[in-house]
Image (cartoon, helix red, strand yellow):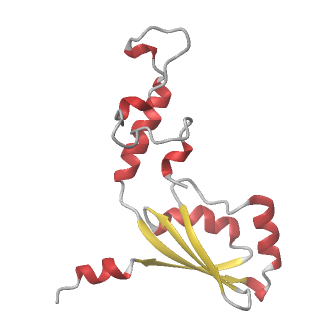
C-alpha cells in the first residue's frame, strides 16, 4: 500500500503521469460553491500538506527480534487475530519472518527512531521479549564506505 492510498480520494494528491495537476489536485470543492479558494475543503488541504511534510521526515529501518515468552506462539496469534498488529501512528510494518520452530519473529519496521516503537512494545511485552536493532540496506551501507 502506498502512503497516499489513505487519502479520501484514494490516489496521490500530487497527481500522476503527464497530466498531473500538482498539489491543487488534492483540494475538494464543497457542494454548490463557486470557484473561490474559500470554497475548497481546508481540512483536506491541510492533510495533503502534512503528508507532504511527513515525506521529508527522516526515517530508519529497524529489525525487531521478538522472542515469545514461554516459547508459545498461541497467545500471540490469538491477540493478533483479535486486535491486529497495533502499531502506533508513524510506524510502518515492512515485512516479517518466523523461525522454523515458531518461537522467534523477525520484523522489519520503518519509523523515525527506535523510541517510536515504545507504545507498540508496551502492548505486547506481557507475551514477547523485544530486541530492536537499527539496520540499513547492504547497498546503503557499502555506499558510505570509502574504498
Q: Is residue 46 above or below residue 114?
A: above
Residue at image position (68%, 73%) is 125
Question: In this orientation, which residue lies closer to the viewer: 116 or 63?
Answer: 63
* Residue 2 in picture, x, y percent from top left: 51, 53
Q: Residue furthest front?
A: 18
* Residue 19 in picture, x, y percent from top left: 35, 36
Question: In this orientation, which residue lies closer to the viewer: 19 or 136?
Answer: 19
Quarter of the image where the N terminus is located:
bottom right
Q: Is residue 78 left or right of residue 67?
A: right
Q: Is residue 142 left or right of residue 70?
A: left
Quarter of the image where the C terminus is located:
bottom left
Residue at image position (42%, 78%) is 135
* Residue 54 in picture, x, y percent from top left: 40, 49
Q: Is residue 19 above or below residue 30?
A: below
Residue at image position (57%, 72%) is 95
| Number of numbered discs | 0
Quadrant of the rendered structure where residue 129 is? bottom right
* Residue 71 in picture, x, y percent from top left: 76, 88
Amino acid at each position: 500500500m502506498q502512503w497516499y492510498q489513505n487519502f479520501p480520494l484514494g490516489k496521490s494528491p500530487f497527481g500522476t503521469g503527464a497530466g498531473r495537476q500538482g498539489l491543487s489536485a488534492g483540494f475538494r470543492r464543497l457542494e454548490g460553491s463557486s470557484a473561490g479558494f474559500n470554497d475548497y475543503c481546508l481540512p483536506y488541504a491541510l492533510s495533503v500538506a502534512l503528508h507532504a511534510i511527513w515525506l521529508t521526515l527522516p526515517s530508519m529501518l529497524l529489525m525487531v527480534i521478538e522472542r515469545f515468552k514461554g516459547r508459545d506462539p498461541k497467545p500471540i496469534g490469538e491477540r493478533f487475530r483479535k486486535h491486529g498488529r497495533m502499531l502506533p501512528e508513524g510506524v510502518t510494518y515492512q515485512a516479517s519472518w518466523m523461525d522454523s520452530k515458531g518461537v522467534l519473529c523477525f520484523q522489519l519496521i520503518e519509523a523515525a527512531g527506535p523510541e517510536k516503537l515504545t507504545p507498540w512494545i508496551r502492548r505486547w511485552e506481557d507475551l514477547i521479549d523485544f530486541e530492536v536493532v537499527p539496520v540499513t540496506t547492504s547497498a546503503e551501507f557499502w555506499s558510505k564506505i570509502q574504498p
